[in-house]
Amino acid sequence: MSAETTAGPIAQDDDSSAGSGKNRRARRIILIIAAAAVTAGALWFARHESYGKYQQSTNDAYVQTDGVTVSPKVSGYVDKVFVIDNQEVKAGQPLVQIDPRDYRAQAEQSHAQIALAAASAAGTEAQIREQQSAIAQAEAQLAAAQADADFANSEVARYQPLAQSGAETKERLSQLRNQAAQANAKLASARAAAASARQRVATLEAQIRQAQAQGQAARAQLSAANTDLQSTIIRAATNGRIGDKTVQQGQFVQPATRLMTLMPADSLYIEANFKETQVGLMRVGQPVSVEVDALPGVEIRGTVASISPGTGAQFSILPPQNATGNFTKIVQRVPVRIAIHVGPETRKLLVPGMSVEVSVDTRSAKGATEQIRREQEQYNRRIGK
């Protein structure tokens, strides 16, 4: 019985030692967990202050490209369609051909008008050469008439004193005067004929200039006709893929009719719509991290290319008029264009309209707020004076 009494207290001491050991381990674990939590919180706070709070992200962002609307410059029936939906094309590759026969006929007509104008000018030049002979003949006749008139006038002058003295009869003097009058009349006629012949040359030269002008007009029409003829073949303006094709062979099209859309493959970018409260430190050139919904786990790098000069609401078809009716303040969004840096394989998978999530690192402008504040304070003091 004494042995049992002695064993009882020893067993109780072992239980208390085991309990105190467990408590010490629990406290140690709690302290470790608390220290780890404090350390993690401190690290998170330090990272947030130095990095996290400068990351501005949004999922209101989409892949975009400046699509080219393919439209004809001339009207006509579509003769051939060289591409199909979603086909990749190169710059200068033919897409559609419009029936060229009407425009080819216009070009041939302009060629004929040019030839007609050239022939008219050549014929007029031949007339000028003929007229030079007529001028020479008229000048010869003028010289003969001048000689006859000079002789007749000299005879009248010589016989007039003789008739007055009675050495010659008055009838002879009257006859000579009549001959002189006729010679003078023929001289005047010869002068008029020579002047008319010379003026005829000026008229023919004017006709040449008119024919040359007609030729220039025909050449301008030919140039326009050739341009229209070349425009019957619609070519790709840039490398890209064909989308939203609506044109069919045999269809009649008018100028500016949309036939298809060419989506350039080399000009993809992202348009992200950030809240106005996020763009205060956003600057062109800042790095961007992009995650595409279609490529989970793939990070794409980019840079801020430009920031819109107005909110999206300002460029909508019907911009808001907040001065009318009841007003509810709504946080506006500012479109930001982001240039992306991707390889050929990634570029093949990206198509306009895809949803993405972007995060802009604005740390490069973290001192801008304080600088703006100081600048405004200086300005306020200056205008206050």
Image: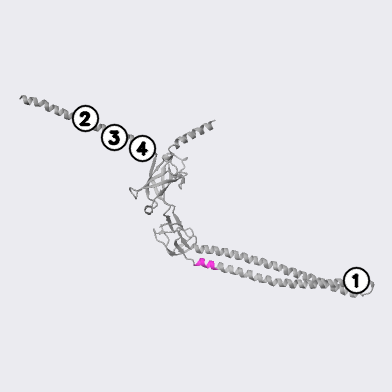
Residue 278 in the image, given as x and y percentages of width and height: 41, 40
Distance between mark 4 and mark 2 Cα atoms: 34 Å
Q: Amino acid at mark 3?
A: Ala
The residue sitting at 6% across, 25% down in the picture is: 3
Q: Which mark is residue 24?
A: 2
Residue of label 4: 47
Of labels 4 and 1, the one closer to you: 4
Q: Amino acid at mark 4?
A: Arg
Residue 83 in the image, given as x and y percentages of width and height: 41, 61
Distance between mark 2 and mark 1 Cα atoms: 169 Å
The residue sitting at 55% across, 68% down in the picture is: 109
The residue sitting at 36% across, 37% down in the picture is: 48
Q: Amino acid at mark 2?
A: Arg
Frontmost residue, 112 versus 36:
36
Q: Which residues are magenta?
A: 101-108
Residue 361 in which image quadrant: top left
Residue of label 1: 160
Report if residue 141 is visible in the image. Answer: yes
Query: Mark 4 or mark 2, which has the lower sequence index?
Result: 2
Residue 93 in the image, given as x and y percentages of width and height: 44, 61
- How would you classify the magenta stretch by its main secondary structure? helix
Residue of label 3: 36
Q: Is residue 193 magenta?
A: no
Query: Mark 4 or mark 1, which has the lower sequence index?
Result: 4
**In terms of secondary structure, where does tag 3 sit?**
helix
Specify few, some or many for label 4: CA neighbours under 10 Å numbering under 14, 14-19, or 20 or more: few
